[in-house]
C-alpha cells in the first residue's frame, strides 16, 4: 500500500506526492462544483430550473418543494465549491457535498433517470475519497486557521 500511496517527499519539509495529489484533486472537484453553480447563476437560474422542474411533474414530489430545491442548488454549489477550492472548513464542505449528492441522487432516482444516478454516484465517490484522505489536506486555508491564534 505504501507504494501506491507514495507519502514520501523528495526533500525534508516539502509536501508528499499524496499531499500534492490531494490538493490538486480537491481543487479539481471544487472548481467543477463551483462552475456548475456559477454558470447557472450567471445565465439565470430560471433558464436551468424550468426545464429541470418539468421532469418532476409526473413524480410524487410536491412541485413547490421541487422548485425550491432546484432554485437553491446553484447557490449551494457556488458556496460549497468556493470553500472546497480554498480548503476552508474542508471537512464540513465535503460532508455538505455528499449531502448535496444524496439529494441529487434522490431526484434522479425519483425520475428513474438511471444514467444521471450513475453520474452522481461517481461524484459521491470523489467526495468520499477526499473526506477519507482529509489528513493529506496540505495547502488549505484550514491549516492557517487552526495554527494562527
Image (cartoon, rainbow, N blue to C red):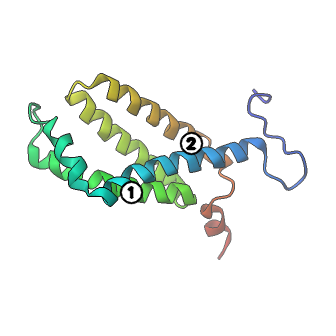
- Reply above or below: 144 against 103: below
- Reply above or below: 3 against 140: above
Q: Crowding at label 2, few (<14), some or many (≥20) Cα neighbours within 10 Å?
A: many
Q: Position of residue 102 (x, y in %)?
A: 34, 38
Left or right: 123, with 42 as reference point:
right
Q: Nearer the viewer, residue 32 or 64?
A: 32
Tag shown at residue 130: 2
For label 2, the SS is helix
Q: Position of residue 106 (x, y in %)?
A: 27, 34
Name the image quarter holding residue 119.
Answer: top left
Left or right: 83, with 69 as reference point:
right
Q: Crowding at label 1, few (<14), some or many (≥20) Cα neighbours within 10 Å?
A: many
Q: Position of residue 77 (x, y in %)?
A: 38, 53
For label 1, the SS is helix
Q: Nearer the viewer, residue 53 or 10?
A: 53
The mark lying in front, picked from 2 and 1, is 1
How many marks can you see? 2
Residue pictured at 65% horizontal, 49% vertical = 23
In the picture, the quarter occupied by the N terminus is top right
Q: Position of residue 59 (x, y in %)?
A: 11, 31
Residue pictured at 27% horizontal, 31% vertical = 108
Name the image quarter holding residue 66.
Answer: top left
Residue that carries the numbered disc 1 in the rendered image = 38
Labels 2 and 1: the sequence-earlier one: 1
Determine if residue 135 is in view: no
Whole-angstrom CA distance, mark 2 to mark 1, is 22 Å
Tag shown at residue 66: none
Amino acid at each position: 500500500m505504501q507504494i501506491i500511496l507514495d507519502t514520501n517527499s523528495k526533500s525534508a519539509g516539502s509536501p508528499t506526492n499524496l499531499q500534492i495529489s490531494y490538493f490538486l484533486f480537491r481543487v479539481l472537484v471544487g472548481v467543477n462544483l463551483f462552475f456548475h453553480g456559477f454558470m447557472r447563476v450567471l445565465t439565470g437560474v430560471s433558464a436551468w430550473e424550468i426545464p429541470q422542474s418539468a421532469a418532476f411533474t409526473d413524480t410524487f414530489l410536491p412541485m413547490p418543494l421541487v422548485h425550491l430545491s432546484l432554485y437553491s442548488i446553484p447557490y449551494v454549489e457556488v458556496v460549497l465549491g468556493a470553500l472546497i477550492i480554498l480548503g476552508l472548513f474542508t471537512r464540513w464542505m465535503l460532508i455538505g457535498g455528499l449531502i448535496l449528492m444524496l439529494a441529487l441522487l434522490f431526484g434522479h432516482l425519483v425520475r428513474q433517470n438511471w444514467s444521471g444516478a450513475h453520474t452522481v454516484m461517481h461524484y459521491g465517490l470523489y467526495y468520499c475519497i477526499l473526506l477519507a484522505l482529509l489528513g493529506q489536506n496540505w495547502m488549505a486555508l484550514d491549516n492557517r486557521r487552526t495554527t494562527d491564534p
